[in-house]
Image (tube, rainbow, N blue to C red):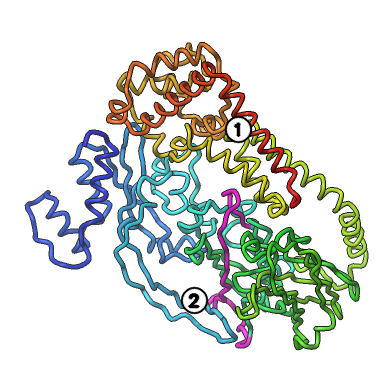
Amino acid sequence: MTTDIEKVRSLFVWMGCQNFQSGSIPNGKEDSPLSYMSKVKKKTMSYAAFFVKICRAAGLKSVLIKGIAKSVVYDVGDPLEELQQLRNNWCAIHVNGDWRFVFPLWAYSAVEGRITDKYTLIEGGKMSRSKASPGSAVKKFNEFFFLTDPDVFIHFAFPDNPDWQLLTVPLTLDRYLEEPYFRQPYFENKLQVATLLPGVQKAKHGIVEIGMKSLIENWQGLLTYQLFFNNKKSTEVLPKKTQLSNFVLMDRCNSNWKFTVRFPIDGVYKLTINGGVPPKSNEWVCDFKLVCKTAIEDIPPLPCDTGAVGWGPSNNLEQYGLTAPSHTHGTILTKLRQYLYIGFTLTKKLFIRSELIGNKYKPSELDQYVDQRITNRELVVKVMVPEDGEFALRVYARETKKLPEENVINYLITTDDPSGPRTYRKENAFEKNLRKELIKVISKKAKSRRDFLKIRKDLTDATVRRHYGTLDTAIKKARESKYEAKLKNTTKKAEEVRNEVYSTWIHEILDMKPSTVAEVKTYKNPPSAIFDTMKAVYLLLGESADMLKSWEDIHSVLSTIGNDSLLQRIKTFQTSQLREHALEEAQKLTEQHDLPSIKSKSPAAGTFYVWVRDLVNMINDERSNPKRKKKRKEISTFSAKTTSTKKSQ
């Protein structure tokens, strides 16, 4: 082991493999690993203190940090005086010029089954008051708390010394305590709470709204919720038959979610949001504390509990065979005794059933208010509400009559804004909404055709250009559009060309993680092979040779982020941008070295070396054999034109 990263990683893995919770550990000599392990088992030394000891013994700078950490003991909104139970410690390790966080206790173990007795959850019409339980520690290996990013770590642990936040602008203790209770899956799924809402939300007009979205493009995850009632801090008693899940409207629009909580009585509540990407779609994401002092008297519950399906279209709606929904939000405003038309495109043969549900009605009593028809794979559901209020339109689908039907989408049909004061008499608002809907219907077909032609043209052009970034963007737009089924053949051809480009000289680069690129940055005085390789990379990307004279120059551009980061620049790179002298200089630099010797020094640098070598060879080959380039372009053009004339489009 020669690098700091190798040392700290080896120590981290070794310590995680030790069994501190069971078995016997003999007492070793004072200041020996065995003596420290014995103290950890006896709980006279913390995991973090032990990790600091062995890191220092390995020659690594390490610091034990004390402060408060939001463990499972924490409840969102806990006051300052209750923080003593959150006292904890963790470490900062100096690795290759930077300080990084490690939280050994959380990295090696977790507490399962801990329950407080503050809250009541009602499901299936049954009240379940939680019985307090301290939970039990279980051995787990969690990479999340190894070298954690300071911007993320601060949401879990707050040091006594603000300097050890390692942030340019330190977070205040008040801000730390005001935050929602974020859990690990929140950051792993790159979720974001809208407008930085505080963790304690006060109801306005008996309503609290919480928006959330994922920053991952075309995120395939799910979110669900649980609403709890705080028995100890609420002055009113929750009626036994109150189904709390029916007072949360989870409105979905692709990767955007809005939770609208309407409170049946005044009191203190907790909203827990769970989610993730299947099969981990029920991970604990975050908690909010909700305080209501303005509950609306006799507010009705939602017509039904939709469960994980929620209200509105989801990303996985297409897997059921329904695409291009005419209404992209879960709530639809309507007017009494006026027909509403909701449309979908079917990508396969399905048996569809629609039903309308209302709080005061049996389902059979509302059959006359909902109808549906399928024409040329276009499903249109016609619905009308019999009175003012809220109704649920539920759509079920199955491929054969032998299979059980599944609820694929739900809409809340209402004659009043569910997120505002409930007046039931908003005539002007209704008229305004109806005018907007009419304008949308008139222009929908013309705009739809223009959008389709634009997406298809982008696919065809990208196929001809054979540029990876352009292809990737065009394919994503086609896949995420409501025309995916109609563009199937054109998209398939574009994907084939993209995969061909991908497999020739860029795939290893795109597969690299930012942490792998960071490995190159750790060098203070790298071997000439690594210096020459990275200089060749930046020359091809358009950097001036005068700005790449030293490793400090290269290290500076390696540190850029966002659209100017190295991986992003390579992904969007076009050969037309190449300058002749840059190509020649890059070739000279790489010819001085061979791949095996570079990979032995740095696997990441080896990947960049392959990219430079293959790109230079490809350009030189096309210049020496122009017919190949012309032929390749003609084939791409012919294929694109042929595909675009398919009848299906």
Q: Nearer the viewer, residue 255 or 82?
A: 255
Viewed as shown, does residue 36 lie left or right of 356?
Answer: left
Q: Nearer the viewer, residue 206 or 627?
A: 627
Residue 257 appears at what percent x and percent y? 65, 60
Residue 278 appears at what percent x and percent y? 50, 63
The image shows residue 76, relative to residue 531, as above or below, that is: below
Q: Is residue 573 magenta?
A: no
Q: Residue at left 43%, top 59%?
A: 70
The disc at residue 118 is: 2
The disc at residue 608 is: none
Q: Residues within 10 Å of mark 2 (few under 14, many from 20)?
A: some
Q: Earlier in the sequence, mark 2 or mark 1?
A: 2
Q: Which contiguous range is marked in magenta?
A: 212-241
Residue 545 appears at what percent x and percent y? 48, 13
Viewed as shown, does residue 493 lie left or right of 50?
Answer: right
SS label for mark 1: loop
The image shows residue 428, relative to residue 548, as above or below, that is: below
Q: Amino acid at mark 1?
A: Arg
**Residue 425 occupies quadrant:** bottom right
Residue 35 appears at what percent x and percent y? 12, 55
Q: Is residue 56 visible?
A: yes
